[in-house]
Image (cartoon, rainbow, N blue to C red):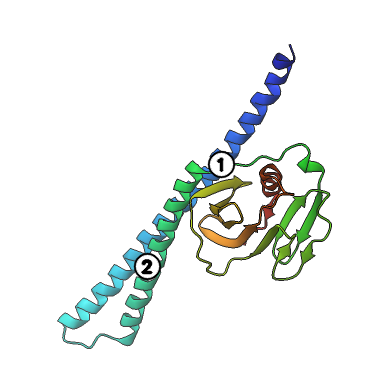
Amino acid sequence: MRFLLDMPRAVNAIGLILLGALAAGGGAAFFLYQANTDRLALIAKAEEARLIADEAARSGRTVTDEANRKLDAASQEIAKAQARIRALEEERTWLAKATTLTTSRIATTWKEWINFTLGVTVKLPPTVTDVKIADANLDAGWLVIKPYKDENISTDTAYLVKGHLLIGSKTETSWMFRVQSNANITHVVYVYPNPRVTERTILDALSTLTFRDQ
């Protein structure tokens, strides 16, 4: 009987998880479409600049510095757009593989810690009482969050938290994730498991993370 009573709540929870995943995936698809559109517009501008240069060459006139500048600028922007498209496609792949983290009932009661400069909030268990909050990072000992600075992060694990991907790797002694949304990488999250902090506690803490869009 209790199982039957709990079923609507379970169905609702599953529905929310699916909606969250669909929303995140839809966002990635939108930005991928927009990036492709921007790339096509840039290609058109580059072609226009090339035609101007070709016409100048055929007529025996010297190609102007302005035409060359436009062509170089368009080529650079096309390269950036193509790199962004590759990043969005990679992100869409990770979205399909990521484990969605949902906050447990007990974690909702934990104290929330905020670093306004980083644009980060996280809830941590009552055992965590000394959190160092500075402009550059949020340091709770076994959980550290910093701005992303081109760190080399191996990737074999991904979590989805409120529309943001945590992509990285885990070992017995350390976890390291980059935080990204819409192909923009903003933060790095370090976790240092120890005998006093269970994996369940770590995942509960990660599930409470929020990141201000950059």
Residue at label 2?
79
Q: Secondary structure at mark 1?
A: strand
Image coords of residue 55 (percent x, y) = 20, 77
Camera-nearest residue between 131 and 11: 131
Q: Quadrant of residue 120?
A: bottom right
Q: Quadrant of residue 70?
A: bottom left
Camera-nearest residue between 160 and 212: 160
Q: Residue type at mark 1: give it.
A: Thr
Q: Are marks 1 and 2 in contact (CB under 8 Å)?
A: no
Residue at label 1?
99
Image coords of residue 3 (percent x, y) = 70, 16
79 relative to 175, above or below: below
Image coords of residue 95 (percent x, y) = 50, 45
Q: Which circle, 1 or 2, is nearer the viewer? A: 1
Image coords of residue 148 (percent x, y) = 58, 66
Crowd around label 2: few <14 · some 14–19 · many ≥20 (10 Å): some
State the residue at coordinates (49%, 42%). 97
Q: Residue type at mark 2: give it.
A: Ala
Is residue 54 left or right of 10 when viewed as pictured?
A: left
Is residue 187 left or right of 91 when viewed as pictured?
A: right
Camera-nearest residue between 208 and 15: 208
Q: Which mark is residue 117?
A: none
Is residue 61 left or right of 170 when viewed as pictured?
A: left
Q: Quadrant of residue 99?
A: top right
State the residue at coordinates (26%, 73%). 50
